[in-house]
């Protein structure tokens, strides 16, 4: 490849990495690989992806349960390049319809990240508990906050 072509390709590839949406967190892992969690997570959908600082982001977790869930809570821990930076807790029924019937359901949480949030790689750990404090599931996945403010702004 000629030097002129290479000079053109590098910025193009870099730009595509910043603006192409990838909406599914493919590498969702259970916190304890040997545990038999009551809630099985199928997928995590993140919209928009990459997440844009100062704009709403929605995390939708598709899951299934073998038993009805009348209530509980979600505990979320966020790490940035391996450093724990944030924790929050949410009422499960504010993130999905309760009671959760046996079968498939979706937990969805939207949040606006501050404009000063640094771009880069983040990890999220989510634990779900029932109303009695029993852990129903625990998952981890990585996500990315982009340099650009949003894909629509480009």
Image (cartoon, rainbow, N blue to C red):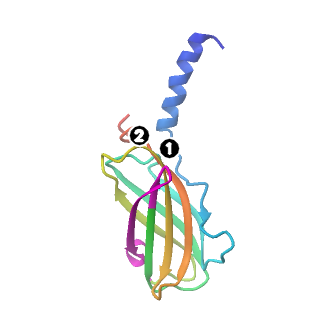
Image quadrant in which you'd find residue 74: bottom left
In this picture, is 133 found above or below 149?
Answer: below
In primary-sequence order, the first of circles 2 and 1 is 1
**Dot 1 alpha-carbon crowd within 10 angstroms: few under 14, some 14 to 19, many 20 or more:** some
Q: Name the residue rendered at 54%, 28% in the picture.
A: 13
**Residue 140: image location, x then y, percent:** 55, 62
- Observer able to see residue 60: yes
**Dot 2 alpha-carbon crowd within 10 angstroms: few under 14, some 14 to 19, many 20 or more:** some
Quarter of the image with the C terminus in it? top left
Q: Name the residue rendered at 52%, 51% in the picture.
A: 23
The one nearer the camera, 116 or 96, is: 116
Q: Which mark is residue 151?
A: 2
Q: Name the residue rendered at 58%, 85% in the picture.
A: 67
In this picture, is 58 found above or below 93?
Answer: above
Q: Is residue 154 left or right of residue 122?
A: left
Q: Are marks 2 and 1 in contact (CB under 8 Å)?
A: yes
The one nearer the camera, 86 or 151, is: 86
**Residue 30: image location, x then y, percent:** 61, 67
Magenta region includes residue 83 = yes
For marks 2 and 1, give the CA distance: 8 Å
Helix, strand or loop at label 2? It is loop
- Observer able to see residue 97: no
Q: Is residue 153 left or right of residue 80?
A: left
**Residue 133: image location, x then y, percent:** 47, 85
**Residue 147: image location, x then y, percent:** 41, 38
**Number of marks drawn:** 2
In this picture, is 82 found above or below 17?
Answer: below
Q: Which mark is residue 21?
A: 1
The magenta-colored residue range is 78-98
């Amino acid at each position: 490849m000629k030097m002129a072509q290479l000079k053109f390709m590098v910025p193009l590839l870099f730009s595509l990495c910043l603006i192409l949406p990838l909406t599914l967190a493919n590498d969702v892992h259970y916190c304890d690989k040997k545990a038999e969690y009551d809630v099985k997570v199928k997928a995590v959908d993140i919209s928009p992806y990459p997440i844009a600082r100062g704009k709403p982001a929605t995390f939708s977790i598709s899951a299934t349960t073998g038993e009805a869930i009348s209530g509980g809570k979600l505990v979320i821990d966020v790490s940035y390049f391996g450093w724990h930076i944030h924790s929050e807790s949410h009422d499960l029924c504010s993130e999905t319809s309760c009671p959760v019937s046996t079968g498939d359901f979706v937990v969805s949480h939207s949040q606006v990240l501050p404009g000063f949030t640094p771009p880069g790689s983040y990890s999220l750990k989510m634990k779900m508990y029932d109303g009695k404090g029993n852990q129903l599931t625990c998952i981890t996945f990585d996500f990315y906050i982009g340099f650009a403010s949003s894909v629509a702004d480009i």
